Amino acid sequence: MNYKLLSATLLVGSFMFTSCSDINEPTPLTQQQSISTQTANKIKALGFNPDNASRIAEGYLVEKDVILTDADLAKGALIFDKTAPKEEQYRTTQLVTGLPRVIKVKVATTLSTLFVQATDEMITRYNSLGLLITFQRITSGTANINITKDETLPSGVLGSGGFPTSSGNPYSTIKMKPSTFGSAPSLGFVATVLTHEVGHCIGFRHTDYMARVCGGGNEGSAGIGAILIPGTPSTIDKASFMISCAGGNIPFSAYDKIALDALY
């Protein structure tokens, strides 16, 4: 989905598919805070599952990998473009605009060299598709997307990101939790997680939103549903980089490329 918020995360568990400059880190909360029934209803109205949602510094963390801000909840409902092409993962009308456009990405110095290399691989994956949106890693100046380290993310979460803003900019921060990756993650796996989070930042929701393969049920579609891009399946594309769970290196599937080409 697309909104001015955030996040996507991948979970590590028994279910797996075989398949620099300083950055100001966001202020973490020492512990997650529970939410009220009123807030849960607002989250549900946006088409998200409020179960296990929690209060964080930026707003609310829902579905383990999506960040909703207070401004998002105040809208009462997300607006969908019923005529725009969409894949199994659906989006709101808020996409990155001003195309063609180069999105500048910066990796925090608190992250290891592996995350820098994985960022470069993520950029290569997107830029190889010939889209109207491309990516460039910078080490100084102002970035459009800052990749940061945040060990306060919930247990099992690899990373989180958000959705594009109402002004057409990508979500500005991707948080990564290195400890969840283990002691020696592969470059391809870390690059896949980053590619997934960037996917959220430019407007994609999970391919399996209607029945998450790692549990959690139906994330909801705000009463609108999903309109398929011609040539993509109506069933879950388990080869997609936007699947909600992953345990390895997952390149773009054929349907991912169709979806990305349709939007950008």
Image (spheres, grey):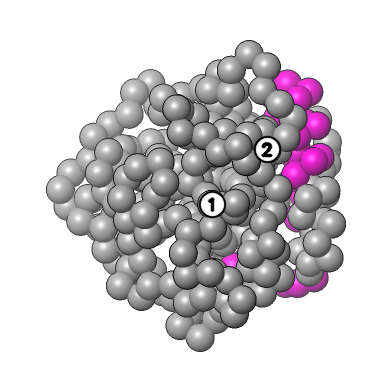
- Can you tell which mark lies on residue 249? 2
Residue 56 spot, x, y in % from top left: 38, 36
Residue pointed to by mark 1: 238
* Residue 121 can be seen, yes or no: yes
Q: Quadrant of residue 58?
A: top left
Asked if the residue under mark 2 is in contact with the one under mark 1, i.e. CB atoms within 8 Å, the reply is no
Q: N-terminal of the two: label 1 or label 2?
A: 1
* Residue located farthest toward the top when viewing the structure as drawn: 183
Mark 2 closeness class: few <14, some 14–19, many ≥20 residues within 10 Å: some
Residue 237 spot, x, y in % from top left: 54, 58
Range of the magenta residues?
94-122
Question: Would residue 2 appear left or right of 45 to someone viewing this image?
Answer: right
* 187 inside magenta stretch: no
Q: Quadrant of residue 193?
A: top right
Q: Residue at x 45, y 55 (%)?
A: 208
Mark 1 closeness class: few <14, some 14–19, many ≥20 residues within 10 Å: some
Q: Residue at x 77, y 55 (%)?
A: 126
The C terminus sits in image quarter:
bottom right
The amino acid pointed to by label 1 is Lys
Question: Would residue 8 appear left or right of 69 to someone viewing this image?
Answer: right
Residue 1 spot, x, y in % from top left: 48, 62
